[in-house]
Image (cartoon, rainbow, N blue to C red):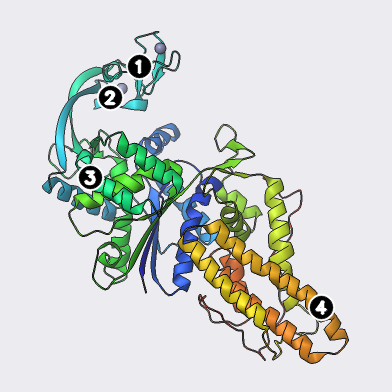
Amino acid sequence: MKNVLIGIAWTYANSDIHLGHIIAYMPGDVLARFHRAKGDNVLMVSGTDCHGTPTTERAIREGKTPREIVERYHEQYVEVFRRLGMSYDYYTMTATSYHAEKVQDMIKKLYANGYIYSKTEPASFCPKCGKFVYDREVEVVCPKCGAVSKGDQCGNCDYVFQAQDLLRGKCRICGSQTEIRDNTNLYFALSKFSKPLKEHFEKCAKYWRKNTVNETAKFLDEGLQDRAVTRDLNWGVPVPFEGFEDKRIYVWIEAVWGYVTATMAYCEQHGLDWRDYWFKKDNQENLIYMCHGKDNIVFHSIIFPALLMATKDPYLMPEHCVSSEFLNINGEKISKSKGNGWPMLDMLDKFNPDSLRFFCIANGPEKRDSNFTFEEYHAQHNGEIVNKFGNFVNRTLNYKGLDGFLPAGEMDNDIRKKIETTYQCVEKNILSCNFRDALSNVMQLVEDANKYYDTMQPWVLYKNEDKTAFNNCIYTCVQIIANLSNLFEPFMPFSAEKIREYLKLNNKPTWNYIEAETGKNFGKFEALFTRLTDKDVM
Ligand SMILES: [Zn+2]
Ligand SMILES: [Zn+2]
């Protein structure tokens, strides 16, 4: 039995969650459900990332407090994950006092270890707002062409602003001219971790997808820069040092630490030791997976490992980064202006959650961006899920000769072997994070099952009153379905559960060949899926 920690990227609390997020998170749930079925000790954690400027900007725009914004989105995310069957053991948020306290402990430890230092530099200060202003908060007059821009590049002539250019500008909050003042911030000495991070990279590259390998290598080659730990904000985790009362911990450092604080919180509530998931111990096997999109790679492959190293505690390194590429809609990026990032709650009102999960895995952007169109989604739902899986289950369990009873019979040997091979293939593919292949292994078994049914022609056996042959055929088909409830568990858990209930199987899925018992009254079976029509679009 292994201790398996699965960390899924934290959703940023400033907009509706959509399919593009979900497609990067879904591998985490597949891993969690698979490892649980194997009997491993799984802990799947994540939460809502509450701090940072886009949240405070939205709060100002809507005349609300940042906490109101955060709580609204957090509630939505929790609802989406529940309806999608994302089996989080613990889903929290970074705006809790528990998280703040544990982040402060980490910061103090890094400071004591000499990896956090303070540095004073000139910065933009708005005298009217009485605070330092950054990036998006400052409008800069381009020294080349005189156009006004925000950010670090001129929107008119593409001139890249130098540090000095950014100091003097206009505060976007109040419109006043900013002035230059000395500002003291804390920095994390990321540069000191070049060597151990390179070693970490070399050790893990064999597990990582190409995008993680490439981006991490590029980031390391460019040379690691120390990073600011504090920012002039009033929304975030307070800095645990005197003189920094007006500042907060920068979101990049505390959000990734959420994986650790969420584990601590969960274990505290359940009488467990969080170190069992995070620390190296003799006679203990561990796996740590981090599932996220490609926009988050270096935070998981470099920054988070560096923080773990900087504590000097015996942390295990998160070796398995499962970094998805992006999902496009109708060949275009998901964006607000295009309105194609349909809120996930609206999609769940229209579509079967298992079908959406199936889409996310079967079309997972594992090596390149993938695309969503309703034509393809409908084709996959009707063609694969309804016609193949749904139909096989339906025509077997609703067979009129069955009357809800599974007759005693003999299992077909070839089919049994195929089922056993499928368990092995799916396991191998899930463990190497090839989820698309794993799902197509299960679908191959469904196709073989349909072929078996068509070849055996149970309806002919029934008509000819060949009772033994009929019973053997139905018995075999029902046992395929019993095993499909295990094999589909990571991908389509709602359907898997319906089958388990119907066949009166053990309540928990397992990862080995099983057989349903004969002689039980199963009752009437209701179809798992309904067909989609042209009207089923957003
Ligand atoms: Zn310019
Ligand atoms: Zn101002």
Distance from disc 1 to disc 2, alpha carbons, whole Å, reads 17 Å
Residue 220 screen position, x and y as percent: 30, 39
Q: Secondary structure at mark 1?
A: strand
In primary-sequence order, the first of circles 1 and 4 is 1
What percent of the width, then of the height, locates residue 97? Answer: 27, 53
Q: Nearer the viewer, mark 1 or mark 3?
A: 3
For the residue marked with disc 4, what is the amino acid? Gln
Q: What's under tag 1, amino acid-wise?
A: Val
**Which amino acid lies under the numbered mark 3 shown in the image of this protein?**
Lys
- Mark 2 residue CB less than 8 A from any atom of ligand 2: yes
CA neighbours of label 1 inside 10 A, class few (<14), some (14 to 19), many (20+): many
Residue type at the position of mark 2: Cys
Whichever of callouts 3 and 4 sits on the residue coming sooner in the sequence is 3
Identify the residue under disc 1.
Answer: 140
Q: Can residue 404 be spotted in the picture?
A: no
Which quadrant is the N terminus positioned in? bottom left
For residue 289, side relative to residue 180 (left or right):
right
In this picture, is 262 found above or below 407?
above
Mark with earlier residue (2, 4): 2
User: Looking at the image, is mark 2 or mark 3 earlier in the sequence?
Assistant: 2
Label whose residue precedes the other's in the sequence (1 or 3): 1
Position of residue 141 in the picture relative to residue 375 (left or right): left
Q: Quadrant of the C terminus?
A: top right
Cα distance between the residues tagged 2 and 3? 43 Å
Which residue, given by chain and number where applicable, does mark 3 sit on?
195
Give the labeled residue for mark 2.
Answer: 129
Indicate the position of residue 125 as horizontal and vertical percent values: 24, 22
Q: Which mark is residue 457?
A: 4
